[in-house]
Amino acid sequence: MNRDIPRKRLEKSANAVPAIEDPLEFKKNKSSDNARNIKSVNEIIKVELWFDKHYLERSTHGDSDGKRHGIDTIIVENLVLNSIKHLLFYSACVNGFMFLNHRTNNVQRNIRIVCQEQTEDGLLNVAIEVHYNSLQSYEVTVKTAMCVDNFKLHDNQYAIEIFNSETSSLKRMTNKRICEVCSI
């Protein structure tokens, strides 16, 4: 046999049978080199989206400065609903970050979060309050919306800027400066 002649490689057939997955196999996961997947569960969380009268009047009729551009209900709805999963992530990972209002909060004012996203009209800013109904149900109310680049946050107030469905940045106003707290 001549060793200088390269071996012929077998081409994969289009009719090849896919490998059978062994459900009892031990695999690497984020916590262990040897773990077995027992079950995957999809939880369903109900989000009730409400629009405050203040926001609705400004989006449809405007105010003393005229109609506000860039705060259409569909754009605002999409931003708020996309922000919820990011807010849940940050509340689990960022020490001291809370966005959820519930009966046991001993605060004088409800927590409001500003959801932000860059649009053709400028930076869309949507102030929301999120309230606990049950473990699987949350009420989100859009309080106001403005499409301006110089939206004013209150001291210690958080804003979440959404870049796309998977990336965002959590910011906080501290001593009249906006500081990035975390990003994904």
Image: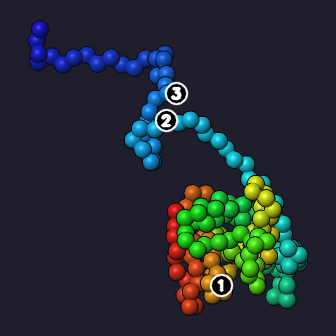
Q: Is residue 142 above or below residue 15?
A: below
Residue farthest along the top direction in this orientation? 1
Q: Is residue 93 above or below residue 54?
A: above
Residue 79 appears at what percent x and percent y? 70, 64
Q: Is residue 145 found left or right of 12 in the rendered image? A: right
Residue 128 appears at what percent x and percent y? 74, 73
Q: Residues within 10 Å of mark 2 (few under 14, many from 20)?
A: some
**What distance separates the C-alpha of mark 3 from that of mark 1?**
51 Å
Residue depicted at x 85% and y 85%: 63
- Label 3–label 2 contact, CB within 8 A: no
Residue in front for this viewpoint, 43 or 184: 43
The kind of residue tagged 1 is: Leu
Q: Is residue 115 found left or right of 5 in the rendered image? A: right
Residue 36: image tag: 2
**What distance separates the C-alpha of mark 1 from that of mark 2?**
47 Å
The kind of residue tagged 3 is: Pro
Q: Secondary structure at mark 1?
A: loop
- Label 3–label 1 contact, CB within 8 A: no
Q: Residues within 10 Å of mark 1 (few under 14, many from 20)?
A: some
The kind of residue tagged 2 is: Arg
Residue in front for this viewpoint, 14 or 40: 40
**Residue that numbered label 1 is attached to:** 153
**Count of numbered labels shown in the rendering:** 3
Residue in front for this viewpoint, 111 or 53: 111
Q: Is residue 147 found left or right of 15 in the rendered image? A: right
Residue 69 makes an appearance in the image? no
Residue 141 appears at what percent x and percent y? 80, 69
**Residue that numbered label 3 is attached to:** 23
Residue depicted at x 52% and y 74%: 181
Residue 182 makes an appearance in the image? yes
Q: Is residue 58 above or below residue 74?
A: below
